[in-house]
Image (cartoon, helix red, strand yellow):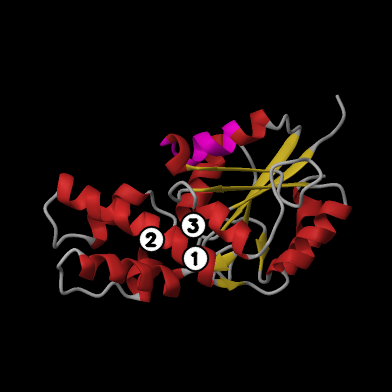
């Protein structure tokens, strides 16, 4: 079988930081729902990488659990996607250039996130990144909101779907590492992101470090 090496990326804290604009979009819907509350950037950063239902249970303690909380979560998710399509987030330096270099080197690039459906697409649309075909910069994506699978399951699903012979995951928090190990793949830690890792793993201190680090991980 011909070798097919894949690099699978986390979103938040790895590729970009959308927390400020996510907080603004959520505050709009919280206030529209009649709550005198502000969702802050630090609130969002504290829960980045977790499934949306867990985030809602953490941040929406001022709501009744069940229909009320679920309705507010759904409203925030939808508004967030539309807001990010218009305003984007903070893309880490040299992401696009690094992806282009990795593509030239023969790597296949993917995104797997614990986000809601439409979030990854909003990111790709804002930055006009083509995706979904082998010729595209990002060939495939998957997320919790599409199928309600945990991150380790979606990493495995994407790797199998794209018939990868080897792959690694690039993320920034402990749960990213845990999911990657559970899925059976090597992990690269983006140390500039939102968290630390309780393990000795290859690291990138800036996104462009990937062009050299990945060669040691996927030999």
* Residue 181 percent across, percent down from the top left: 55, 41
Is residue 114 highlighted in magenta?
A: no
Front one among 218 and 153: 153
Spatial separation of the CA atoms under disc 2 and disc 3: 35 Å
- Residue that mark 1 sits on: 84
Nearer-N-terminus badge (1/2): 2
Q: Is residue 190 visible?
A: no
Residue at image position (67%, 57%) is 202
- Locate residue 69, reporting x and y percent: 19, 52
Compared with 161, 41 (above or below) is below
- Which corner quadrant holds the N terminus? top right
For residue 155: magenta? yes
Which of 172/47 is in front? 47
Q: Nearer the viewer, mark 2 or mark 3?
A: 2
Q: Residue furthest left?
A: 64
Q: Nearer the viewer, mark 3 or mark 1?
A: 1
- Name the residue at 53% across, 50% down: 177
The 10 Å Cα crowd at callout 1, few under 14, some 14 to 19, many 20 or more, is many
Q: CA distance from mark 1 to mark 2?
A: 9 Å
Give the number of the disc on residue 79: 2
Q: Is 5 placed above or below 44 here?
A: above
Residue contact at pointers 1 and 2, CB within 8 angstroms: no
Residue placed under numbered mark 3 in the picture:
198
Cα separation between marks 3 and 1: 32 Å
Please provide the residue range marked out in magenta: 148-157
């Amino acid at each position: 079988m011909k070798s097919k090496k894949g690099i699978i990326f986390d979103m938040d804290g790895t590729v970009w930081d959308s927390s400020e604009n996510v907080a603004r979009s959520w505050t709009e819907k919280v206030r529209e729902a009649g709550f005198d509350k502000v969702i802050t950037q630090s609130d969002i950063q504290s829960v980045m990488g977790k499934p949306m239902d867990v985030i809602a249970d953490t941040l929406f303690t001022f709501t009744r659990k069940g229909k009320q909380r679920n309705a507010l979560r759904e409203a925030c998710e939808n508004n967030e996607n539309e807001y990010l399509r218009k305003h984007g987030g903070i893309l880490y330096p040299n992401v696009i250039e690094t992806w282009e270099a990795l593509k030239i080197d023969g790597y296949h690039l993917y995104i797997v996130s614990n986000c809601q459906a439409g979030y990854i697409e909003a990111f790709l649309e804002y930055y006009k990144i083509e995706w979904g075909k082998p010729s595209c910069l990002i060939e495939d994506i998957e997320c919790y909101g599409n199928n309600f699978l945990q991150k380790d399951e979606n990493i495995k699903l994407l790797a199998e779907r794209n018939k990868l012979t080897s792959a690694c995951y690039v993320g920034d928090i402990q749960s990213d590492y845990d999911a990657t190990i559970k899925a059976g793949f090597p992990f690269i830690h983006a140390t500039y992101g939102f968290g630390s890792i309780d393990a000795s793993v290859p690291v990138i201190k800036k996104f462009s470090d990937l062009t050299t680090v990945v060669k040691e991980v996927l030999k």
